[in-house]
Amino acid sequence: MVAFSKNPLSKNQPRYSRSVRPLKTFFFNTSFLEIVFILLFFSISLSFAQETKATSTISNAPTSAVSNDSMSVVSNDSTTVISNDSESVVSNDSSSVISKASTSSAASSTASADFKKAASEYADNSRFSFFIQPGISFLGFDDREKFQSAIDSIYLDYKAEAVNNAESLAVVKQDFQKVNFTFPISGGIQFQHYKDHFISSGIGFIYNRESVVLTNRNNKTFNYYYTLQAVPLFLEYRMTIPAKFITLTDKSLFSVAFRWYWMLPGTEIYSTWGKIEAERSIAGNGFGLSLGYLIASWNSIRIYGDLGLTSISVSSKEPFSSIVPDASTEKAKWDLGGIQLQIRFSWGAILIKES
C-alpha cells in the first residue's frame, strides 16, 4: 500500500511559494485588468469627445431669424424650441454641460481661495521680528546631593551637641528640594531668510535659589542656601513642518527648532559657603531640541508653545569644595540642561510683501 501526502508534488512539477501566484493565473488576471482599464479609458475619452463637440457646436452655430409661423431645428443632438423673437435655443444637453463645468470651476476657485486665505492667516509673513520667551524648566542639576549631604552633617553635629532629650527634640532640619524647578526667560530677534525657515539669536537668564532652615539645641535658626545662575546666549534654527506631514490639521502649525548655547559672564553657583564662576567656551556649552506649536496669531503677532530638551554642561576652574563643605577638590562641572516648556510671543517688525 502506497501512502500519499495531502499535497503531492512530482519532481518535474514546479513548486510555487505561497506568496507568489502561478504564471498562468497572473497573466489571466493582468489581462482582465488591462481590458477593464482600456474600456474605462475609452468610455471617458468618448464622453470627453461628445462634450467637446457640443461645446464647439454652440460656439460656431449662427443665430437664426425665423418668422412667427415657423419653427427651426438647430442642433442634431436635441430638439430646440424657437421663440417669437427669432433667437434659437441650441441644446439643453449642451447648456447643461456648460453650466456644470462653470459651476465646478467656480466651486474649485472658491475652495482654492478659501484655502489660501486660511493658510495665509496662520503663515508667519514677517521678514524680521522680535520675540520674548518665558518658560518653565526642570534643571538636571545632580550635584544638589552635595549640598544635602552638608545639611545632613550639620544636623548630626547639632544633635550631638544636645545634652538632654529636650534639646535633642529642638534640633530640626529642612531638606533641599529634590528637583530644581525654575522659570527662565529669554528674548531676541528672528529672521525669515526663506519661507517657513527662521534663524534666531537671543539671550536668556536662568535663576534657581534653594534654601533650608536648621534649628540647633537652643532653638536658634540658621539659613543655608545655594543658587544656580546662568546667562545663556543662543543661536536657533527653526523650520515649519508642512501640513502634509501631520494629519492633525490642514494648516502648518507645527515646527521644530535646534539651538546652540554659549554661557556668558554671570553663569555661576554661589552658596552660604562661597561662589564659583563658570568658564567661557568659544565652541559652546550645549544644545537644545524642541517641538513648537502655533497657539494663536493676530496680524503680525504670533504665539508659539515649545516643549523641548536641553543639554548644557558648564565647568569652573574652582572645585565644589569652594561652595560646599567636604566636597570634591577637583575641577567643578555641573549640568544646566533639562526639560523645558516655553511660550514665545513674537512681533513682526518688517513683513514680507505679498506678490
Image: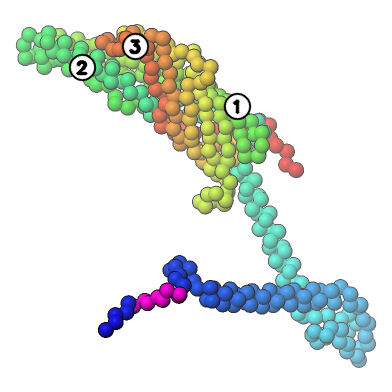
Return the residue at label 3. Answer: 330
Label tally: 3
How far separated are the C-alphas under marks 2 and 3? 22 Å
Indicate yes or no whether the magenta region holds residue 9: yes
Q: Residue at horizontal 50%, vertical 16%? A: 281
Q: How is the image coloured?
A: rainbow
Q: Label 2: state its secondary structure.
A: helix
Which numbered circle lies on residue 189?
1
Asked if disc 1 and disc 3 are in contact, CB closer than 8 Å, the reply is no
Mark with earlier residue (2, 1): 2
Question: Does dot 3 land on a helix, a strand or a loop?
Answer: loop
Quadrant where the N terminus is found in the figure: bottom left
- Front residue of 81/140: it is 140
In front of the other: 48 or 13:
13
For the magenta stretch, what is the residue range? Answer: 6-13
State left or right for residue 85 relative to residue 131. Answer: right
Seen as rendered, the residue at the extreme left is 164
Q: Between marks 1 and 3, how big is the CA–CA gap? A: 39 Å
Q: SS class of the residue under badge 1?
A: strand
Is residue 327 one of those drawn in magenta? no
Q: Is residue 243 above or below residue 157?
A: below
The residue shown at (91%, 90%) is: 70
Q: Position of residue 312 (x, y in %)?
A: 44, 24
Q: Residue at x 51, y 41 (%)?
A: 293
The image shows residue 145 at horizontal and vertical percentages of 28, 20
Q: Earlier in the sequence, mark 2 or mark 3?
A: 2
Q: Which residue is mark 2?
A: 152
